[in-house]
Amino acid sequence: MAVWRDLVLSDPGRATGELREFLDSSYRPPSPIAADLEVLLTEALHRRHALVVAFDTSVEAARTAASLDPSDWPRLITALIIHADIVLCAGDDRAVAAATDAVALVTNLEVPDPGRLTLVRALRAVAVYHHQDGEQGKRELARLLRATPADTPIGAVLAAAATAMADGLRRCGPHQRPTRTPPPLRGGVLQPHLDAPATDELAYRVRAWPANRPPCCVANPRQGKP
């Protein structure tokens, strides 16, 4: 898996082609590994900004993970986290529902997983910020931030996202989407470690679309939506 991760990070275009070829071949690995590779393919497509195709691949990954017997909850959660991320970054109206489904699954685990619960709640806050109420999304994220130690990587990730939300709610004028390669979201296959060093991964996703807010600034279109 490490070789595939390195290829996705260094050359997502090549990784996309080789992963597709491998998954479609007679050498396709057993379903648990195939589920991981389908998630990784989704993340490779995201790094190429191919969000429409990434959405379809994320659905396939979630189906593969959900069909595993015996049930493999960690793999299903990973697939749903990345599916929610793709829906969010695509600006799809189903972003709140996708994140809410992920929150429900992680909340109801027999063995609590507070790290992933914080992550999916943060994704839901960003989706609410984009699609329902920017101020409410900001409040949801602020509650998470208060409950998370500031000196942890995820605390720094949440703090950067909260700053991005505040900036977005203050800004008027046309929204400018980030054009650089999206940083990997922790909790996926590309970056599976929840305690990885902090990046602007969540702030990037906040800036992907403008806040939903009253039309005080009418020149804030949702441009570039796939």
Image (cartoon, rainbow, N blue to C red):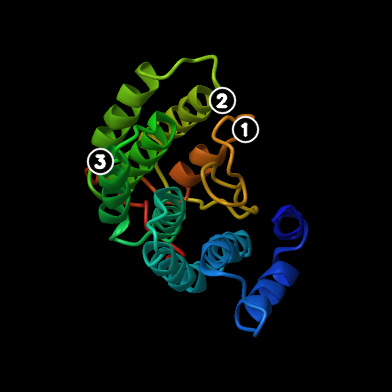
The answer to whether residue 217 is visible is no
Q: Which residue is mark 3?
A: 108
* Disc 2 element: helix
Horizontal and vertical percent position of residue 20? 63, 77
Residue displayed at 62% across by 71% down: 29
Image mark for residue 196 = 1
Tell me which label, 3 or 1, sits earlier in the chain: 3
Give the residue type that dot 3 points to.
Asn
Residue 186 in picture, x, y percent from top left: 54, 41
Using the image, tell me which numbered label, if any, was put on residue 153: 2
Regarding residue 103, the answer to whether it shows in the image is yes
Residue at 37 percent across and 57 percent down: it is 71
Amino acid on which disc 2 is placed: Pro
Mark 2 and mark 1 in contact (Cβ < 8 Å)?
yes
Which of these two is toward me, 167 or 48? 48
Occupied quadrant, residue 18: bottom right
Q: Is residue 222 above or below residue 21?
A: above
**For residue 187, side relative to residue 98 (left or right):** right
Instruction: Provide the secondary structure element on which disc 1 rests.
Output: loop
Q: Secondary structure at mark 3?
A: loop
Q: Gap between marks 3 and 1, in whole Å?
A: 25 Å
